[in-house]
Image (tube, rainbow, N blue to C red):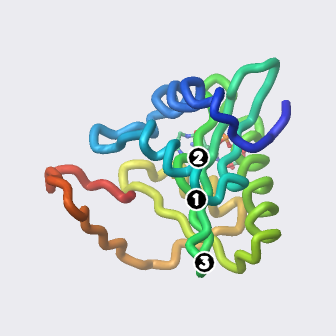
Amino acid sequence: MQIRTFRPSDEAAVIALWERAGIDRPWLDLHAEVAEKRRRDRSLFLVAVDHAEIIGAVMGAYDGRRGWVYHLAVDPPQQRRGLGNKLMEALEHRMLRLGVRKVNLQVRADNPGVASFYEGLGYVDEQLTSFGKWLGRRHDPQDSELD
Ligand SMILES: CC(C)(COP(=O)(O)OP(=O)(O)OC[C@H]1O[C@@H](n2cnc3c(N)ncnc32)[C@H](O)[C@@H]1OP(=O)(O)O)[C@@H](O)C(=O)NCCC(=O)NCCS
């Protein structure tokens, strides 16, 4: 298993992985997100590859103040084998090299199991309420999206 920077040829496999892992949401345009990610912080978009198959991915970002973690996913049959930890550690390492001092991430309220995963890595629930607003795009308020 190898963790490396995302390559354009990985796109279809990464999006399929995100779909299998339940990351996709009706309001997300994952192809557009990947295209945008290729224009900035490319070193923070990581994939885990095993025997030429993408089995994990995470999209990190650095906004100049904080590091952010998006779309961390491990292929369901590969979960609970330490890969999520390895991906996060690799991402944190790369962020540190870019000068990131603090990493933030959001967890959906309907995904409580993942809190233990992040707590195990030293992340703390900071008891903040997340606000968001779509710009220039209609949005269904029924969708309780986080990103
Ligand atoms: C969250 C996710 C990336 C974790 O990846 P993983 O490879 O399974 O995680 P690891 O094997 O490194 O887990 C390390 C530890 O985290 C904890 N943990 C991981 N998943 C957990 C879960 N679903 N419930 C409770 N604890 C969990 C456990 O303590 C685990 O150690 P253990 O297996 O020895 O008990 C993976 O479950 C996943 O892709 N989920 C679907 C997508 C998702 O929710 N992404 C996060 C969006 S915020």
The image quadrant where one finds ligand 1 is top right
Marks 1 and 2 sit apart, C-alpha to C-alpha, by: 7 Å
Q: Nearer the viewer, mark 2 or mark 3?
A: 3
Please give the name of the residue rendered at 68% of the width and 28% of the height, measured from the top-left corner.
Answer: 55
Reading the image, the residue beneath label 2 is 72
Figure check: 75 above or below 147? above
Question: Dot 3 lies on which element?
Answer: loop
The image position of residue 129, as x and y in percent, is 36, 75
Residue found at the very far front of the displayed protein:
39
Figure check: 109 above or below 95? above
Which callout, 2 or 3, points at the residue further toward the start of the chain? 3
Residue 81, by quadrant, is top right
Label 1–label 2 contact, CB within 8 A:
yes
Reading the image, the residue beneath label 1 is 69
Q: Which of 68 and 110 is in front in this view?
A: 68
Marks 2 and 3 sit apart, C-alpha to C-alpha, by: 21 Å
**How many other residues sit within 10 Å of disc 3, few (<14), some (14-19) or many (≥20)?**
few
Reading the image, the residue beneath label 3 is 64
